[in-house]
Image (tube, rainbow, N blue to C red):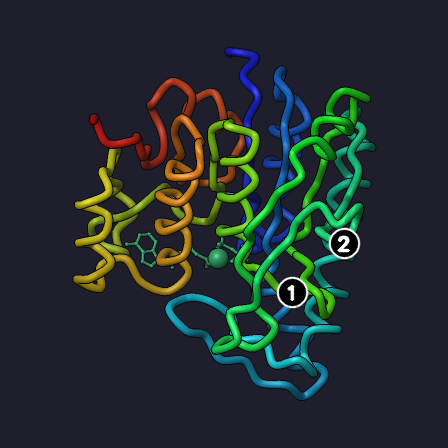
Amino acid sequence: MAEERLLVKLGGSLGGAAGVLDELAAHPGELVLVHGGGPQIGAFLARLGFSTRFEAGERVTPPEQLEAVEMVLTRLGKELAHRLSLLGRPAVAVSGRDAGFLRGQAEVRLGRVGRIEEVDAGFLEALLAAGYTPVVSPIAVDGEGALNVNADLAAAAVAGALAVPAVFLTDVPGVLADPKDPGTRIPRLGRFEAEALIAAGTVAGGMVPKVAAALLALDRGAPWAAIATGSPGVLAEVLAGRAGTRFLPEPV
Ligand SMILES: Nc1ncnc2c1ncn2[C@@H]1O[C@H](COP(=O)(O)OP(=O)(O)OP(=O)(O)O)[C@@H](O)[C@H]1O
Ligand SMILES: [Mg+2]
């Protein structure tokens, strides 16, 4: 397998799926990980008696829920870093609060939700150069404090800033022409087709920000992006173009 440096976004939908971490730990090239945590955040908020609302697949985060969201994401990042380290890949969990490396702007309509405006790529480069795999929790900062960032969009911003491919690992084989039929994977998507699938409602829920993130990653400098199932062997299959849905920049 090519020793390509990759950004991998690990969906919270994968839960504790052990095979995925073995796969990541064994990747011969450098990795930067960004993780989600949708189901885990939802469960924790429910235990606190909060209810959650989504807008176009994105969690609305009222200021009083931010603390719990950040706690869950931070814990998940530390768990991932710990497990990867035990598998022989020393990893360090960070969020945008560390060295202020992810600066965002609030999307006030969604509460304390942010869009990433600036990524300090040098911070991640320093960790990589020291031999550590960064595990990024999707929290950015603005003048007021922390912002919850949709993990797919955070991954796009980071992949763009590092100019590396973005691989989104989730619980489905890619973008499906029929969301109920895993056999209907679409191998390649261009921007126009992708936007049409969102407009038609074929791409819905958590797949909306993910497809938007794949396109955003290309806009911000990633050479390609892909959405695939988090499973053993998946990175080699995606790199070979045999698994997932791949997004390429439009020919100019
Ligand atoms: N056309 C489609 N093709 C594939 N999946 C789709 C489609 N439309 C909607 N989906 C849904 O999108 C889901 C993946 O997004 P989801 O946000 O649930 O996972 P994730 O992003 O991996 O996890 P997290 O949000 O915790 O990081 C799939 O499980 C599927 O139910
Ligand atoms: Mg999601």
Q: Which residue lies under the disc numbered 2?
A: 97
Position of 190 with respect to 237 (left or right) is left
Above or below residue 129? Residue 152 is below
Task: Give residue 206's mark.
Answer: none
Going 47% across and 20% down the picture, which residue do you hit? 236
Residue occupying the far bottom of the picture = 49
Q: Is residue 184 left or right of residue 149?
A: left
The foreground one among 61 and 185 is 61
Residue lying furthest top in this view?
2
In this rendering, the answer to whether 142 lies above or below 222 is: below
Q: Secondary structure at mark 2?
A: loop
As drawn, the label of residue 147 is 1
> Given the image, on which type of amino acid does mark 2 rest?
Arg
Q: CA distance from mark 2 to mark 1?
A: 10 Å
Q: Position of residue 86 (x, y in %)?
A: 82, 32
- Depth order, front residue of 77/118: 118
Pick the quarter of the image with the C terminus.
top left
To which quarter of the image does residue 120 belong?
Answer: top right
For residue 247, side relative to residue 233 (left or right): left
Q: Residue at x 59, y 54 (%)?
A: 36
- The residue under the point 47% across, 35% down is 167
